[in-house]
Image: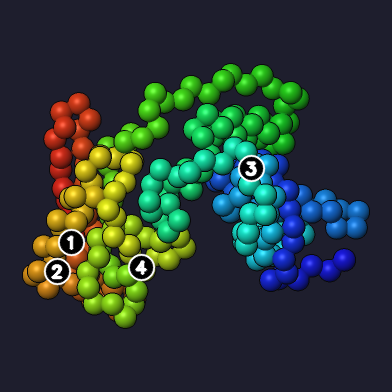
């Protein structure tokens, strides 16, 4: 059987790979190929489009979840579908820890050569939200034809575009208000974002640091 790029397949997702992609298996003649599907979760039934075909593995793009995993939960962040970060918000934190534990065990077995290694339970954090003390946000436009400056993060796989961050659960609970205020100021004063392709423009990025114990903030503007 000859596989072709762009071909659709049906797949059962069994686990998560390092990096967060769902892992399923495709039997081709006498060979069992590993298929990585970004956005798929364990126990999902999916249809996926083949994107990269290698001798021992396949990368596929998620087309549709035909049967949702019972593990799936609603993502907390309203930017989840567009943002390039926090790709596992649809999986409960406890299940994320179990997946990471399995990845460590398999790495020791397959790479280290250990037989049935004993793995201690992962010590999770008390609160998986607002744990970061530094984040960097970009200046840009929603698309290449848009002149209005936008302050936020990059959409998935689109390093030159930026979407406005109205809320984020990684660093501080009012980061959306800060980004909105900065964006409003920049638009009122006609400040332009830096464009990597043309090497023109003024505003490049803004870094926010927060002292978790003191509540003090440092905002660093890069032009």
Q: Which SS class for mark 3?
A: loop
Which residue in the structure is indicated by mark 4? 161
Q: How many residues crowd mark 3 within 10 Å: few (<14), some (14–19), many (20+)?
A: some
Q: Nearer the viewer, mark 3 or mark 1?
A: 3
Left or right of residue 73: residue 49: right
> Splitting the image into 4 quarters, where does residue 17 fall?
top right
Which residue in the structure is indicated by mark 2? 187
Q: How many residues crowd mark 4 within 10 Å: few (<14), some (14–19), many (20+)?
A: many
> Splitting the image into 4 quarters, where does residue 104 fall?
top right
Q: Which SS class for mark 2?
A: helix
Residue sitting at x 69%, y 46%? 13
User: What is the CA distance from the residue labelled 1 to the residue labelled 2?
Assistant: 6 Å
Residue sitting at x 29%, y 55%? 165
Residue 208, labelled with which disc? none
Q: Which SS class for mark 4?
A: loop
Residue 183, labelled with which disc? 1
Q: Earlier in the sequence, mark 1 or mark 4?
A: 4
Mark 1 touches mark 2? (CB < 8 Å): yes
Q: Earlier in the sequence, mark 3 or mark 2?
A: 3
Which residue in the structure is indicated by mark 3? 69
User: What is the CA distance from the residue labelled 1 to the residue labelled 4?
Assistant: 15 Å
Of residues 189 and 176, which is closer to you in this image? 176
Q: Quadrant of the image for the N terminus?
A: bottom right
Q: Which SS class for mark 1?
A: helix
Q: Position of residue 164 (x, y in %)?
A: 29, 60
Q: Nearer the viewer, mark 4 or mark 2?
A: 2
Query: With respect to residue 141, does 220 lie above or below?
Result: above
Of residues 18 and 78, which is closer to you in this image? 78
Left or right of residue 204: residue 145: right
Residue sitting at x 14%, y 69%? 187
Residue sitting at x 58%, y 19%? 120
Q: Position of residue 214 (x, y in %)?
A: 15, 28
């Amino acid at each position: 059987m000859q596989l072709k790029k762009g071909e659709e397949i049906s797949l059962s997702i069994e686990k998560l790979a390092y990096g967060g992609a769902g892992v399923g298996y495709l039997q081709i003649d006498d060979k069992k190929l590993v298929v990585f599907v970004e956005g798929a979760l364990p126990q999902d039934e999916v249809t996926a489009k083949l994107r990269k075909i290698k001798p021992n593995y396949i990368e596929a793009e998620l087309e549709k979840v035909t049967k949702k995993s019972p593990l799936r939960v609603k993502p907390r962040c309203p930017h989840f579908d567009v943002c390039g970060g926090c790709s596992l918000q649809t999986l409960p934190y406890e299940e994320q820890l179990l997946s990471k534990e399995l990845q460590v065990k398999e790495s020791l077995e397959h790479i280290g050569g250990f037989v049935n290694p004993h793995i201690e339970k992962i010590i999770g954090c008390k609160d998986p939200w607002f744990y970061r003390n530094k984040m960097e946000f970009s200046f840009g436009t929603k698309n290449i034809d848009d002149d209005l400056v936008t302050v936020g993060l990059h959409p998935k796989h689109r390093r030159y575009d930026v979407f406005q961050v109205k809320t984020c659960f990684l660093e501080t609970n009012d980061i959306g208000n800060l980004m909105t205020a900065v964006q409003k100021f920049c638009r009122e004063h006609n400040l332009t974002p830096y464009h990597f392709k043309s090497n023109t423009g003024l505003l490049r990025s803004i870094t926010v640091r927060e002292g978790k114990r003191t509540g003090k903030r440092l905002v660093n503007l890069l032009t």
